[in-house]
Image: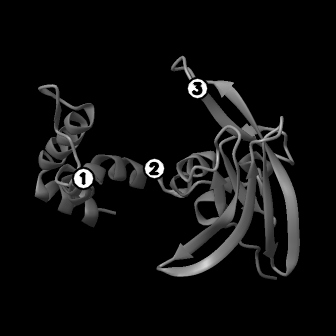
């Protein structure tokens, strides 16, 4: 008799909704009532869509999710809660998971409904499935493989290297990463890639 597969459920591969994205898209705003559609795509092809309605006019702000998954229609609310920001001004907004009642910034599509990741005990992130050797190698070589992206960011149109005569924190951070990548000898990269 065949053995059941032990592939873990990866949170990286499922659809998710985050408060960060909703803030960026200007859904989360005091006194705001806004509806729209969230679209997910892979390689330029739309794979999923969901209709949302965010209501910040009520005493308890809410997110209404309206979608169909595997032929089953869903229409339910997820409520928001906030805490004062540690910066001394403003608020940090969280979802209250409708299933676990936990506060979170990201909801994952698990068993056809959006919920907190703790509702699926066997779930993992992709990096948790990598071997110890691969994680160590990735940590050592990641600056080398990120060099192109760092240079693109460094020479992008509106990037500020200096502010009031001093280098910006972002500029200093990027330069440190580039210098770290340039210190890695090429023969060391080859040795690590070819070793077992």
Marks 3/1: CA–CA distance: 29 Å
Please name the residue that numbered disc 2 is placed on.
132
Left or right, residue 161 beside residue 16: left
Please name the residue that numbered disc 1 is placed on.
153
Q: Helix or strand or loop: what does disc 2 sit on?
A: helix
Q: Helix or strand or loop: what does disc 3 sit on?
A: loop
* Place of residue 137 in the rendered image (x, y in percent of width and height, measured from the top left): 33, 52
Q: Quadrant of residue 32?
A: top right
Say which label, 1 or 2, has the lower sequence index: 2
Answer few, some or many: residues within 10 Å of disc 2's Cα (few below 14, many 20 plus, some between 14 and 19).
few
Query: Considering depth in this image, is 78 or 118 the residue closer to the camera?
Result: 78
**Image quadrant in which the C terminus is located:** bottom left
Confirm or deny contact between disc 3 and disc 2 (CB under 8 A).
no
Please name the residue that numbered disc 3 is placed on.
90
Left or right, residue 143 beside residue 88: left
Residue at image position (26%, 31%) is 169
Q: Is residue 10 visible in the rendered structure shown here?
A: no
Q: Helix or strand or loop: what does disc 1 sit on?
A: helix
Marks 1/2: CA–CA distance: 30 Å
């Amino acid at each position: 008799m065949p053995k059941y597969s032990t592939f873990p459920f990866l949170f990286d591969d499922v659809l998710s909704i985050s408060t960060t994205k909703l803030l960026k898209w200007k859904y989360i705003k005091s006194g705001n009532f806004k509806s729209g559609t969230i679209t997910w795509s892979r390689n330029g092809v739309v794979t999923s869509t969901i209709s949302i309605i965010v209501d910040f006019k009520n005493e308890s702000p809410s997110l209404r999710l309206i979608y169909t998954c595997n032929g089953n229609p869903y229409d339910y609310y997820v409520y928001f809660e906030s805490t004062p920001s540690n910066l001394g001004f403003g608020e940090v907004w969280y979802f209250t998971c409708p299933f676990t009642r936990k506060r979170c910034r990201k909801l994952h599509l698990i068993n056809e409904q959006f919920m907190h990741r703790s509702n699926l005990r066997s779930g993992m992130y992709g990096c948790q499935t990598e071997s110890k050797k691969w994680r160590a190698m990735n940590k050592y070589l990641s600056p080398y493989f990120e060099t192109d992206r760092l240079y693109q960011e460094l020479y992008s149109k509106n990037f500020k290297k200096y502010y009031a005569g001093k280098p910006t924190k972002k500029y200093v951070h990027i330069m440190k990463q580039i210098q770290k990548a340039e210190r890695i000898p090429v023969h060391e990269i080859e040795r690590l890639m070819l070793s077992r």
